[in-house]
Image (spheres, grey):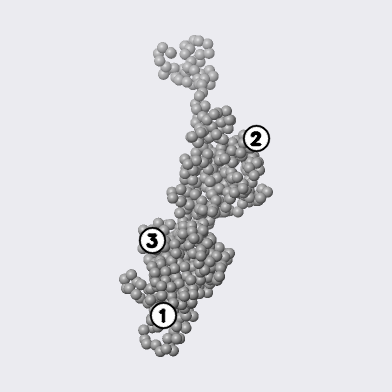
Amino acid sequence: MTRSLTKTQIKKEIITSGKDPVYFIDNYGKIAHPIKGMIPFSMYSFQKDIVGDYQDNRFNIILKARQLGISTVTAVYVAWFVLFHQNKNVVVMATKLQTAANLVRKIKFALRSIPEWMRISELVVDNKNSFELSNGSQVKAISTSGDAGRSEALSLLVIDEAAIIEGLEDLWAGLYPTLSTGGDCIIISTPKGVGNLFHKLYIEADQGLNDFNPVKLPWDLHPERDHEWYTKETKNMSKREIAQELECSFNMSGDTLIHGKDLMRIQEEELEEPEYKAGFDRNLWIWKQPEEGNKYFMVADVARGDGKDNSTFYVFNSDTMEICCEYQGKQPLDSFAKMIYDTSKNYGMCLTVVENNSVGITVLTKLKDYGHTKMYYSRKSTHDYVEQSYAEHATATVPGFSTTVKTRPMIIAKLEEFIRNKVLKIKSKRLFNELKTFIWNNGKAQAMRSYNDDLVMACAIGCWVRDTALTVNEQDMQYKKVMINAIMTSNKSLDTRISGMNQKKKDNYIYNDNKKQRVVSLDKLPFFMK
């Protein structure tokens, strides 16, 4: 509105703008365009909906694609919020202090660009990372340090690019109580895998398990974007970048060991409910009962039973790598050893591989006491599989499987290879959930903070054992059979008798007495043998 207004009209405009942030932004909001300079902020319909959500809900969590102008919309909304409300304390947090400060500068720009008669509050304190208005409201950018915002009583907390902020879980634990007096919260981010706080809060909000209002904004909400734009924009982007920047996909966007497309395939095509849930704790999940003629092997990862880690085991079909059963739970070591023994016996006393960490040795000892005859042994240093009958009398062998700095990358790589090549079918929801939070962190594959990887590691050991120890052992057996079959004697002999001797046939051929079979024509024999 550039025309001159009467006092009555000005009063009406101020009142209307104060009641309706969409009206205020549409009529008085301005943004800095990189080429055109300061221009009016004409919001798209989805941006107006976002402002309405901000006004109607205390807690909002926005899962968005890139370049939808959501940060700018939020900045102008905050400008409206502090301009028309007294003594409001707004804190802005982002991946870096500089990024948060940039959002604060957008808020100040929006305040300075409104008509002078609309400025019912003026800036009285103006710093690089904060400012204060004459009505007592203030906006401040804060860092992502451990004590950030803990002493504040917040009216509005804005967290930008939440999925990328490291240690947000700890920050949130300190910041959430500051909103207890009735403050609002806006969390905005593109996705970055699963398991982080942003993913957790959004999924819970989507399921109605927390107070956040979830909003999803994929790339095609923008009215100026079509398939041609998408094709051009994604031409030089990886699938992971496309998922993160445009498609709002949690599974496809993270730095997980298992590629997002494989995780989606597992979720859509492979997951199955177990046929039975057995055991005293109902945590033994069974998909396939033992069948005569099939060979099986078992892998167990042992935990103490008193911490956050679980003891786990798998039974695999040796030929198909089909997962037959899975256990995850907390048990005393002797009880867990007995469960391993009973399960192994149920599957034909199958080969049992136990990780020989500190508590694993106890389980291995118990299995030996129970009379288990198919325990996995390996050579020291080489990790080569050795059969129990030989290993028990050898000095350079150890019971169980050793997960070391050397073997860990190999077994994890084998798990990824088996899943990528569809050799291993993931049936278990428990295992799938662990795979979603098993990520690359500084070049090392491991579970995200506060998540477990017990099932992942047991399954990875199973893949490595099947593809190395059992395959090599099977090949050795085949080689031995071929060697044995090659060691044979011939009962064929050449008849060197001359005509007239007993049992000499009267025809023109020499016969083998044992086989009664023609050997060679007399005409073809050397002259001295005729």
* Mark closest to the chain's N terminus, 2 or 3: 3
According to the image, label 2 marks what residue?
Answer: 369
According to the image, label 1 marks what residue?
Answer: 119
Residue 516 in view of the camera: no
Q: In the image, what residue occupies the spot 39% across and 79% down?
A: 114
Instruction: Give the residue type that dot 2 points to.
Output: Asp
Say the numbered circle drawn on residue 161. Answer: none
On the image, which quarter does residue 41 sit in?
bottom left
CB within 8 Å, label 1 to label 2: no
Q: Position of residue 407 (x, y in %)?
A: 48, 41
User: How many angstroms separate mark 2 from mark 3 (CA)?
Assistant: 61 Å
Which mark's residue is nearer the viewer, 2 or 3? 2
Query: For mark 3, does the 10 Å Cα neighbourhood hold few (<14), some (14 to 19), or many (20 or more) residues?
Result: some
Q: Position of residue 51 (x, y in %)?
A: 47, 74
Residue 279 in view of the camera: yes
User: How many angstroms separate mark 1 from mark 3 (CA)?
Assistant: 43 Å
Instruction: Give the residue type that dot 1 points to.
Output: Arg
According to the image, label 3 marks what residue?
Answer: 234
Quarter the N terminus occupies: bottom left
Instruction: Give the residue type that dot 3 points to.
Output: Thr
Q: Nearer the viewer, residue 492 or 224?
A: 224
Q: In the image, what residue occupies the spot 65% across and 41% down?
A: 334
Q: Position of residue 433 (x, y in %)?
A: 54, 54
Which mark's residue is nearer the viewer, 1 or 3? 1
